[in-house]
Amino acid sequence: MIKAILIFNNHGKPRLIRFYQYFTEDMQQQIIRETFHLVSKRDDNVCNFLEGGSLIGGSDYKLIYRHYATLYFVFCVDSSESELGILDLIQVFVETLDKCFENVCELDLIFHMDKVHYILQEVVMGGMVLETNMNEIVAQVEVQNRMEKSEGGLSAAPARAVSAVKNMNLPEIPRNINIGDINIKVPSLSPF
Amino acid sequence: MSDVVEKTLTALPSLLSLDSQPGSAKLSSSSKLGNLIRGITELTSKHEEEKLIQRELLLIKEQVSSPNTTMRQMKELMVRAIYCEMLGYGVSFSYIHAIKLAQQGNVLEKRVGYLAVSLFLNEGHELLLLLVNTVLKDLQSTNLIEVCMALTVVSQMFPKDMIPAILPLVEEKLNHPKEIIRRKAVLALYKFYLIAPNQVQHIHNKFRKALCDKDPGVMSASLHIYLQLIQENPEGYKDLAPSFVTILKQVVAGKLPMDFNYHSVPAPWLQIHLLRILSLLGKSDQSTSEIMYEILDESLRRAEMNHNITYAILYECVKCVYTIHPKSDLLEKAAKCIGNFVLSPKINLKYLGLKALTYVVQQDPKLALQHQMTIIECLDHPDLIIKRETLELLFRITNEQNVTVIVEKMLDFLQINKDDHTTIDLVGKVAELAEKYAPDNEWFIETMNTVFSVGGDLLQPDIPNSFLKLLSEGFDSVEEDKKLRLFAVNSYVSLLEGGPSKLPQRFLQVICWVLGEFSHLREDLEPDVVLRMLAKLLDMKSSSSETKCWVLMAMTKLCSGGAALALVQDVSETYSSSLDTMLRQRAQELQILSQDSKLQAKVLPRSASMEPVEVDSSLSFLDGFVSEALAAGAAPYKPPHQRQEELSRSKALNMEPYGLSLPIGMSSCSVTDRQSPTLLSISSGLSGDSADFSHKGSSAALKLDGVKRLWGRDGYLAKKEAAEEAPQVEAASPVRSPSQRGDTDGSVSQTPTPECDQEKQQLASSLFVGLATQSSVCLMGKSEPTSQRFRRKPKASGGSEPMSNPLASPSDGADNVLPQNLLDSSDLDVSSPEQTHGLPQDPDTPNGSCTAEEESADPMAEPSAHEDLDRSRDSCLSSHLPAELSALSHSEITSLCSNQSLDVSACHVQREDSVVLVVFVSNRSDFCLQQMRLQVQSEELEVSCASDCPSEELKSHSVAVCQYLLTVQRPSVHFDLSATVSWQLPAGSPQTAPFSYKLPLTGFIRALRLSTEEYGAMWLAYSHDTKLNLTLMDDDQDPLAATLHVLKRKLQLHVVEIIGVEAIVACCLQQDQPCLMHCRVHAGMLAVWLRSPVPDLPDCLLYHCQRALQEP
C-alpha cells in the first residue's frame, strides 16, 4: 500500500499532498515538514530510499523519493511495495504530467493542482497502484478533458443558459464577450 | 443567418464558462486562485502568509455559505479551499459544501466535489454518511465518468458500516463491459476487504473471475487482493499456484500487447506482484515450489537488460528463490544476482543488494563472506542509509568472535546518527548482542553503559529491565556473578564521582538500583559514601521524580545504621512532605526502615534479590470468591477488550440484519478450553496475559539463533579460509588502535599493495570471523537468548493438574484454572431421544445421589452381571411408565436410593412441550409400606405434581409411579432436584431417605422452526448474548455441516439456513424462550454467537454445545 504521496519544492512548500491513511491535519503538516527535512538534506548521489522513521508507521514504512529540478516527489509506502517499482512509478507519473501539461514545470502543478490530482487518481487509487501504462493514463485523463470541453456545449449546459441562448439577440452576443480576458496566461512569476 | 447561429454556438462555451455574476467579478477561476498564489509568493514572512490566508478563508467562508453562490462558483471556491488546506489551514467550514457539490453539481463540479471530499474527510468522519446517497446514485449512473468517480471516492474512504448499502452495486460492476470500470471495482472491493473483511467474504468466487478476466489490467488489479489473501492464509490458495505460474510465463514470454511494455520490459509491475505471490505460496512447500522453478529460472535469465525496472524484477526473483523450497542451481544463480546488486555502482542497487544479503544471510551466512570487501566499503559509505543497512546485515552475522568489532561499528554509527527512530532500534540491537555474545564482564558493562548513555530516555524500557534482571539472577557460576556485579558497582561509582548530571534518567535509575543492591560487594566501599553520592543525585535539578524514587529506594536498602543516619533522616524529612505521592511513600519507607534495622533486614533481605517472588498470577485464591459472587448473581467479568468491542458495536449503526460478522478480534481471545460458562472470564483473561508475555519474549529474540540451514553446500568458503583463521585477538586490535595497523602483518593472502586496502582486509577478517563455523556458544554462559528468560514458568501448580483427566477438552491446557469437581461432575448428556440404554448404575448406593449422566471417569467398571441386572430392571420398570409417556423417549432409569425396604428410581421424559419427571418407588420388602410420600423440589425448576402416588400404601413387591411436571424458572447448565421419600413399615417408626436427581438443560431444549426472515427480526430484538469459538468436527468435505449435524442430533437444535461458511440455528427453552445461534467458520474454528431474551440461557447452552462437540 502507498500511504502518502507528497510533492514539495526545494524550499519545502507543499505542491500536492495526498494521504491514503488517516492522519490529523497537524500530523499531516508535521509529516510534510519532517519528510522535507529528511529528504532535502540528502545529496543527489545517495540512494532514493529512506526508512520511514517514527512519524509514519515506523520501520515497516519507507520513503521513496525522486528529485526533479525544483520538485521532490516522495512516496511513503509499506513493505508490500517494491522499492524499485515505486521509483519507476514516480517516473511514470512525472512523464505523464509532462505529457498532459507539455513540458511540465512547478507552475503547472501550482495552478492546476486539481488536474494533477485527477491524473494521480488514475495512477494510484486509494493507495493501490491502478495503472502504470502511461498511454492508458493519458487516455483516461483525456476522456475527462473532452467531457470538460463538451460540458460547455448545449447538451450539458444548464437549462437556464439554454433558454437564454434561445431568447437572446444573436448578432449582439459576441460583442459582450471579451474573450481576451478569459485566458489569463500564467505570468512569469519570480522564484517560489 | 445560419452563419451567425454557427458562430454563436462556437462562442457559447466561452460564454458559459464565465461567471454569471455581473460587473467586475468577470474573472476566470484560475485567476482568483492565481491571485491567491501570487499573493502568497510575494509575502516574505510566515506571519504575513497566515494573515493573508485567514483573510482568504473568511472570504471563502462567506461565499460558500451564501445562497446565491452557484455550483460553478462553488467549484472554484473548493479548489481554493483545497489549496489552503494543503498549506495546513483548517477549512472545516467547507466540508459540508464539498459534499453538497458532489451531490448537486454537474459532472465537472461533482469531480471537484469528490476530490475535495476525499482530501478533507477521513473514513471515520460523520459527514461522510451524507455522501452515501450520492455515491449510490452515481454508481447507478449511465455516465461512465460518474461511475468512475464514485468508485474512486469509495476506494479512498467509505464508512465501514455503510458498505453493505453499496456492495451489490460495486459487485455488479465486476461484470461491466468497460475494463476500466471493472478494474476500479476490483480495487474498491479490495479496499472493502481491508476495512471490513467479513463483508466481502461471499464474493471470493468473483475475485477468481476477476483473476481470469480477459483484460490484463483487471487481472493485475485482482492480484492486489490475492497478495493480501495469500499473505493471510497461504494454505487456502495453493490451488491457484499453477495459474499464477502460467500467467507469469505468458507475461515473461511477451504474450501481452505491446502497450504493457515499459522500457521494453513486459508489464514489470505485474511481474513483481506475481513473484511476490509465488514466494508466499512456495514458502516451505516443496510441491508448490517445484512448479515455479522453471519460470523463476526463466525470469532470472530474461531480466538481463540494464534498466532499473529489470532490477526490480530480479530483486523479487532472488527473494522468491530464497523463500521457497530451495533448489541448488537456482540458489546459485540468485547468489550471483545478489553479487551484481552489491557490486553495482548504482547506489540504489547497492542498497537493495544489502537488503537481499540481509535476508539471505540467515540461510546462507557464507554468502556474506563472498562480499566482505564490498560490505566493508559500504560501512564507510557517506550515505547513512547504506551504512545502517550494512549494520543491519552485520547484526545478522554476529557471533561471539566478531561481536566486539560489530558492536563498536554500531556505536560509532550511533554517535553520528541523529534520527531518533534509528537510535532506538540500533541501541536495542547493541544491547541484545551484548547480552548474548559478550566476551567478558568489563566489555559487557562498558557496552551497556554506552547503550544507556546514548540511548538516553528514548530507550525501550525492557532494555534496562532485562539488564537488571541479568545482573540479579546471575548465571551458573557464583564467582562469575560476583565479579560481574562488582565490576558494575565499580564502574558506576566512578561514573557518579565524575559528573552524573549528564547521564540520562534511565541510566541513573539503573545505577541507583545496582548500587543499592550490590554495593556491599565492594568491601572497601562504605555505605555512607554511597549514600552521600545518592543524596547528591537528589539535589540535582535534572533528576525526575521517578529517578528520585529510585534513589530513595536505593537509600532504603543501604541505610542499615551507621554514620549517615543523619543524612538519611534529613532526606526523608525533606521528601515526606513532597507533593508527589510516590516520592512521599518512598520517603516514609526510608524513614521507618532506617530506624528499625531488624525490620529492614526482614523486608529487604540482602542477597535475596535473586530469589524469585512467588506470584500467583492466575489469582486462583480468588476462585472461591468469584464463584460465590457468580452464584449470588453477579455479572461475569468481561475483559476490557470484550467490553470495548461490545460498546463500540452498540454505538455503531449496524446495517446487517443480524450481524453476519463476528469481529476478528474475537478469535484472539478464544477460550476453547473453557469448561463452564461462569468461569469464562478468568480463563480468557489469562490467555490474554500469556499471549502478551510470549509476544514480548519473541520480539526481542535474536533471529540468527536456530536458523535453518536449508542449503548445506560448502562451495563458497573454500577460497576464504584465511579469513577464518585470523585469531580473534589479533583481529580486534587493528580497529582499536590505529597505530598498530601498520605493523600488523597482513596475514591474509589477497592483500594488495596499498595500506588502506590492507586495513580493510583486516577489518574484514575481524568482522567475518567465525562465520563459517557457526556455533551458538555464548561466552556469557547463556546459550539461550536472554529474552527467553522472561518466559513465564509453566503453571505446574496443583490447579492445572486436573487436565490429566482423559475426558477434559483437548485444550492447550495452559490456562485452565478450573477446580477438579467441575470437570468431573458430568460428561455425557443423555437427553437425545436415540439413546436407549446402557449406562452402568450403582444399585448399592445406600441413599446416594445419581445423576442422569454417565460417570464415565469412574475407573471401577461395573461387573457385567450387574449391568444385565440393571438392564432387566430398566426394562421392567419402563413397563410401569404411564401409557401416555411410554411412547416418548425417556432417559434411562436410574436408581437413586435403595435400602432394605424400597428402591427409588427415576427418569425424565421429554414431551413436546414439557419435561416430566417419573419416579418409581418399588417396595422390596415383604411388607406393605404405609404413608409413603414423596417430596421433590428444586431451586431453578418449578416442580408441580402431575400425578401423585396413587395411594399412600405400597404393597409388597409392587411399584408406585409418580409424575412431576418440570418448568424452568432460571436457566442453568444442570438442574438439581432434591427429594425425600418417607414411609412407614407396619411395625415401626416413620423413615425417610433423601435422594437427588440431576438433569441437564438439554432436556428442556426444543427445536425452534423459523424462517430466515423471522430469525433476522428476532435476532435484533434480543439483548443477552455470548460468543465463543468452538472446535469444528473433523470432516474433510464439510466441517460446518458435520458440526451442525452433531449439534442437531445431540441438542435438538434447528438449523434454519446454511449460507456458505455461516449458519443460523434456532432453538427454544420450553416453547416460549427462544435462543438464536449464529455460527461462522473462521480460521479453522466455529465462531458461535448466541442471543436470547433470557439471561444466562446463551451461556448455558453454549456450554452444552461445547460438550456436544468435544465428545466422540
Image: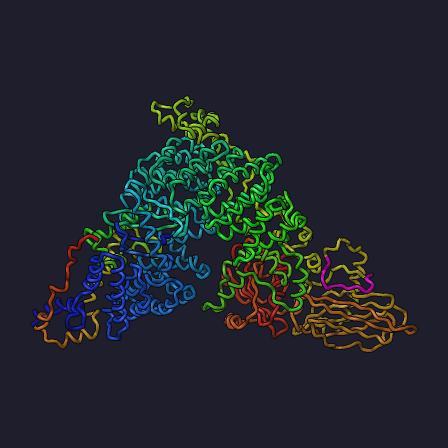
Is residue A129 visible to us here? yes
Q: Tell me, yes or no, whether the highlighted magenta stretch contains residue B845.
A: yes
Magenta part, dominant SS: loop
Measuring from the top left, give residue B425's x and y in whole percent: 44, 45
Kindly identify the residue that appears in the image at 75 percent across and 69 percent down. B978
Comparing B1060 with B985, the one in front is B985
Q: Report whether B822 appears left or right of B847.
A: left
Front residue of this view, candidates B802 and B231: B802
Describe the colour scheme in one phrase: rainbow
Q: Which of these two is toward me, A1 or B771?
A: B771
Residue B998 sits above or below residue B379 on the image: below
Q: Residue at x 64, y 51 (%)?
A: B595
- Identity of the residue furthest to the right in this view: B987
Image quarter of residue B197? bottom left
Q: For residue B188: magenta? A: no
Rendered-image quadrant of the N terminus of chain B: bottom left
Q: Position of residue B1025 (x, y in %)?
A: 56, 67
Instruction: Say above or below: B809 vs B305.
Output: below
Whole-percent x, y for residue B356 in the image: 40, 39
Q: Position of residue B916 (x, y in %)?
A: 71, 72
User: Which quadrant is the C terminus of chain B positioned in?
Assistant: bottom right
Q: Start and end of the magenta stretch?
A: B844-855
| Numbered circles on residues, count | 0
B822 horizontally vs B59: left or right = right
Can the viewer see residue A99? no
Q: Residue at x 21, y 66 (%)?
A: A151
